[in-house]
Amino acid sequence: MNEKLKNNPVMKVLLGNSRLIVLLIMVVVFTVLTSGKFFTYKNLINILYAVSLYGIMITGAAFAVLVGGIDRTVSGNAALSGAVVAMTILTRGVGGGNVALAIFLGLGCGALSGLIHGLILSRFNIPAFLLTLATNEVLYGIVQFVTGNQLIYIRECALMDYIGQVRWLGIPIPVYIMIACVIFSYIVLNHTVYGRQIYSVGGNRISSELSGVPARRDILIAYIISGFMGALAGFVLSSMNQQASSTQAKNYENDVLAAIVVGGVSMRGGSGTIQGAILGAFLIGVIGNGMTLIGVDAIYHNMIKGLIIIAAISIDMASVPGSPLNNFLRKFKKKKA
Amino acid sequence: MSENKELLFEMKNIEKIFSHVHALDHVNFDVRKGEVHALLGENGAGKSTLIKILTGVYTKDGGQIYMDGKEIEINSREDAANAGIAVIFQELSLIPTLSVYQNILLGKEISKFGFISDSAEKKQIQDLIDHYGFPVKATDIVETLSVAQKQMVEILKALATDAKLIIMDEPTASLSSRESELLFKIINQLRDKGVSIIYISHRLEEVFNLSDRITILRDGKNAGVIEKEDIVPSEVVKMMIGKEVSESTASRTLKTSDAETVLEVKHLTHLGYYDDVSFEVKKGEVLVLTGLVGSGRTEVVRTIYGADPYDSGQILFEGKPIKPTISKSVTNGFGLIPEDRRTQGFSPLLSVTKNVALTSYDKIAKSGFVKASDEDKLGEKAVELTDLRPANPKVKVGDLSGGNQQKAVLGKWLTRDLKVILIDEPTVGIDIGAKDEIYNIIEGLASQGVAVLMVSSDIAEVLRVAHRILVMREGRVIKEFNDGVATQEDILLASSGYVENQEEA
């Protein structure tokens, strides 16, 4: 490639982020395959709208992964938050104060759930995957209890209608909320002491502690952020649907974690970026949307998504020197050379 | 025991060359039937190379190996096992959730028509245990056993494959003294049953008590073979060190500083780790804690830093008693270079800059926000102060060589205003050139008035940097070298339990 092209700022960004290139290629491929149907304003907004929910969750869940853990309760927190908001409004009415209280309680539930998980996971040597797998079930149980296992409709709540229906400059409000969350996470991870400590604790907790880093506190905060963002996504989801249900957001955590891995965040913690994780979400979103437009049968969607995740994990594993996959690739390269 | 002089195993003129360096130079070594034969030598004398050749990890570059009078070739671990040679690994290789007999017969299960015959297995192993009189049961689950018992299972595993020669490499390193006694009893029983044992240990006391013969290696050459009756501890140490070692590296003139005391420890005790440890470190002084691994040195240092608890005693910093926590220590101007840099020293995925800056955010951050340019300054300063190579603070620490990784860890603290630095085995696995640079850094810190408390097992290193030396053994300070000349021999004797100048029985 010639030097002039290499120094072009756009090229620089592209070369530094292979996922962006893959994403752009996907967009072109789907546009061609759908003879333009993919690349329409309406469809692109659809993708943005769908990805925004996952995006909000990712901006929280990425903290848990970066600090060396994992949080599968983002979906449970979302469901609980939606249910609490809906029930509060249902019982107290849609007055301004009541809506504020509802939101406070809903998001507070998420933060509280994160606090509890953080307290346990920062202190005890319990695998985060197993704990949050179990507690996510508990959370859905609580949601069933709160909603009485009924679909709760939220009617005439101005704020939630606004979030769910209104568009600014043709773009739905949830997308702006996602952008705000991404900016928040980006700043915290890249420009604060806490962000630096997250990467350090995720990379080597013992060495961080010996350097004076309060690792327990950092892990605790990571799960609180994750819980809060899950709850925020739940509130947004309830606003979009104008309802809360006991199965709201169920299994979203799989796509959230898939996007985080596909986005290049290491499942061992300590490495990866929030912009990468969001790109991962867009990749998964674009592929799902594109396959639907092409007319790929829905039964193949999960299969293809699974293959993409395997590819992402393989890249993650292969990047570790000394790992079997890394050794294998090295041998392979040597043979070729 | 010594009446049975028939040779079991013999190595003649063994040579091994690593990139033009003679790691083993015509070494001879033999073991009799039913003999405990100790292999002694300082680090780098060639002990482990020799053991690796006879277990098939390395192949020899010259010489012959005989088993029962027949010449054999050992080119792989299988060859060694077939010849009846077994190693008891330091890191035990047992499966904790399986029983003793299942572990011993792993891969060699007794089966009928493809089904494992449990009762036959149990009986066979219990018979084996009874034959040697080991205090374990065939049906015990391994994870419920003590470390010493696990070692016995390892030994049984070797015996089950009809091993005639068992190699034990520092078997007592992780045992308590009572457990060690038990192991010695087992070793004596094995000897009485005609099993031969090659015994490697830094603890001279136990070597002298156990061995029927000692072979000493020095710089890859034979330095002597001694029969049990002829053992004189100080002579053995001299043979290990060698007479031709120059005075400058074999000894050091020590001097107590009259500067003010920065750190003082009084009767510090952590039950089970160390007991009644007292010392003081002065401004600009390098105090070295030496002794064998497991003597409690690391734990003392970690306690002072606030990383480990203690039961009683006092820690004083600048004359005032303190109850250390890590964060308080860091604010007070303490720094720690931990024992194992890879697991405790740095985040491998992060750059030198980010690793170095980690200790200094209290100084450079404003209300929790960080400016990258401030971090970069610290990273560049660390590279400059430690002469880190490559001289690029953006490189991930995990990608650096061992010596430069350690420099990055040092950089974490050199960029702060230090009053006390605690350094634990700073040069393990580091090449000679980088070692010297690290010593220079330590000396530089001392000359700036930093109180240095260092842990080291490497006697050459101790003599290179120490102003004063404390020797620890089994959790206690057993000897202090304050003023006058300390020699390699003095320290080696003191660490291995021979304290001659001190009446303490």
Image (spheres, coloured by chain):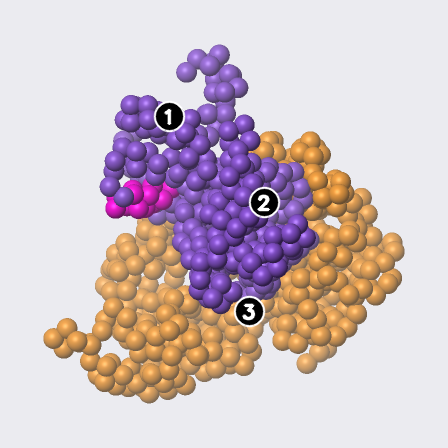
Chain colours: A purple, B orange
Q: B245 or A46: which is nearer to us?
A: A46
Any part of residue A193 in sight:
yes
**Residue drawn where x is 44% and y is 32% of the image:** A45
Please determine whether, in this image, residue B279 is positioned above or below residue B251: below
> Which of the two discs, 2 and 1, labels the residue nearer the N terminus?
1
Q: Is residue A206 left or right of residue B161?
A: right
Kindly state the secondary structure of the residue where label 3 is placed: loop
Q: Give, as a single range, the part of the protein colored magenta.
A: A299-312
Residue drawn at x 78%, y 45% is B417
Name the residue type under label 2: Ala
Q: Are marks 2 and 3 in contact (CB under 8 Å)?
A: no
For label 1, the residue is A39
Q: Is residue A303 magenta?
A: yes
Same subunit under labels 2 and 1?
yes
Q: Residues within 10 Å of mark 1 (few under 14, many from 20)?
A: some
**Which mark identifies residue B203?**
3
